[in-house]
Image: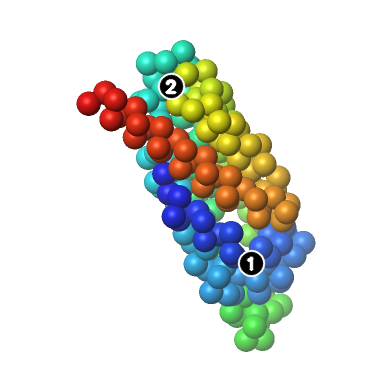
Amino acid sequence: MSIALICPVLFAVHPPTDPGHNREFALGANTLSYRLAWSLQVYALTPVILGMFALYATLAPTPGRRWAMAGLILTVCGACFVLVGGGFAIIVVPAAGLLISQGHEQDVVRLLDQVYREPGLVTVFLGGLVYNIGLVITSVAVWRSKTLPRWAAGLLAAAGVLGLPAFLDVTAFQRVVPALFAAAFLALAAGIWHQAAIKT
């Protein structure tokens, strides 16, 4: 479930993404490590979405099925809304950083300031919150299922809970959360694989 795509973000720079630091965000994004790691993280959402359907198929016949359905809906919808904003983070902001470094600071920073005032950004913000809440709900389904390892449910719950402050630009959590996601998704993928092997 996208483990290899999430891990590189551990080594990326974490420029402040709040609207009050648009210049610093853009300049920090104008690096190879940011471009590579955050592009892979955004692209990893697609395999995560597909993996959520596989996870639901595993959990549907278990006592956690209702939680699994709620988690599937929230996680997939949230991820789809976050994907809309992914282009801004991995294309627009690095390009803005390049232009700022070439001396076009005033107009570029004004453009970035305006982006944060656009009403369409609200759905991206809500999507990030809903995505993490969906993962916490999914962790309850995994716990109640008695099919997949309960420690995997704990990892997923921790990733979802800590994912909220990470999404809200708390840098310390941004360093920890990708590793939690990678461990949780790896554990769930192994559990799904094991269950599929048992049934065949």
Amino acid type of the residue tagged 2 in the rendering: Thr
**How crowded is the residue under tag 2: few (<14 C-alpha within 10 Å), some, or many (20+)?**
some
Label 2 to label 1, Cα distance in Å?
38 Å
- Pointer 2 with pointer 1, Cβ within 8 A: no
- Considering only order in the chain, which callout, 1 or 2, is on the residue closer to the N terminus? 1
Q: Is residue 51 above or below residue 59?
A: below
**Which residue is depicted at the point 62% across and 86% down?**
102
**Which residue is depicted at the point 37% across and 16% down?**
61
How many dots with numbers? 2
Q: Quadrant of the C terminus?
A: top left
Q: Quadrant of residue 96?
A: bottom right
Q: Is residue 127 above or below residue 169?
A: above
* Local SS, label 2: loop
Q: Is residue 193 left or right of residue 116?
A: left
Disc 1 target residue: 13
Disc 2 target residue: 147
Does the rendering let one see residue 187?
Answer: yes
Residue 143 on image: x %, y %: 53, 22
Residue 21 on image: x %, y %: 75, 65
Does the rendering let one see residue 67?
Answer: no
* Local SS, label 1: loop
Residue 169 on image: x %, y %: 70, 53
Amino acid type of the residue tagged 1 in the rendering: Val
Residue 136 on image: x %, y %: 59, 31
Q: Quadrant of the N terminus?
A: top left
